[in-house]
Image: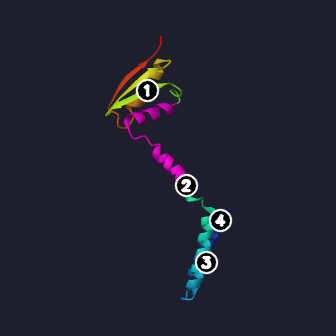
């Protein structure tokens, strides 16, 4: 609703400028109307602190190293969710360790690691109990 009011104020200002003959004396009226519109728009927008928090959280949560990217993919995969796997990297080589319940889990972890950006080689040391 508030966004609609701000939009209508903007449309009204546009019609005032375009629809009528604009005189120099109208500049003060237009400036006053623009200040009122700006205050109303600021009133419907969340404070900058509320916007900055989620943006900064996203920036800090972006994985930057190969092992962080692989770890993020393993943690968000439906098949591997909840599995305790250790991921380390040495440059573009990633080593995965842990114990998973089946060979399918082991294969999926290696596949995800191998297709991760920045990973050239995967050392899959995941154990599968017999």
Q: Nearer the viewer, mark 2 or mark 4?
A: 2
Which one is earlier in the sequence, the residue at label 2 or at label 4? 4
Please tell me whether residue 122 belongs to the stretch shown in magenta: no
Give the CA distance from mark 3 to mark 1.
61 Å
Q: Which mark is residue 51?
A: 2
Q: Earlier in the sequence, mark 1 or mark 4?
A: 4
Q: Which mark is drawn over residue 4?
A: 4
Q: Which SS does the magenta portion mostly show?
A: helix
Q: Secondary structure at mark 2?
A: helix
Magenta span of residues:
51-77
> In the rendered structure, are the residues bearing label 3 and label 2 in contact, judged by CB atoms less than 8 Å apart?
no
Q: Secondary structure at mark 3?
A: helix
User: Is residue 59 covered in magenta?
Assistant: yes
Q: Quadrant of residue 116?
A: top left
- Mark 3 or 2: the one toward you: 2
Image spot of residue 93 (x, y percent): 32, 30
Residues at badges 2 and 4 in contact (C-beta under 8 Å)? no
């Amino acid at each position: 609703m508030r966004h609609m009011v701000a939009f209508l104020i903007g449309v009204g200002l546009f019609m005032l400028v375009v629809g009528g003959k604009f005189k120099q004396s109208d500049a003060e009226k237009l400036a006053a109307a623009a200040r009122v519109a700006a205050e109303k728009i600021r009133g419907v927008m969340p404070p900058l602190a509320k916007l900055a928090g989620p943006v900064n959280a996203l920036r800090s949560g972006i994985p930057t190293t190969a092992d962080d990217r692989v770890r993020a993919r393993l943690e968000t995969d439906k098949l591997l969710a909840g599995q305790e796997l250790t991921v380390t990297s040495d440059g573009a080589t990633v080593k995965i360790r842990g114990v998973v319940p089946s060979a399918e889990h082991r294969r999926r972890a290696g596949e995800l690691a191998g297709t991760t950006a920045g990973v050239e080689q995967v050392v899959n040391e995941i154990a599968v109990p017999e």
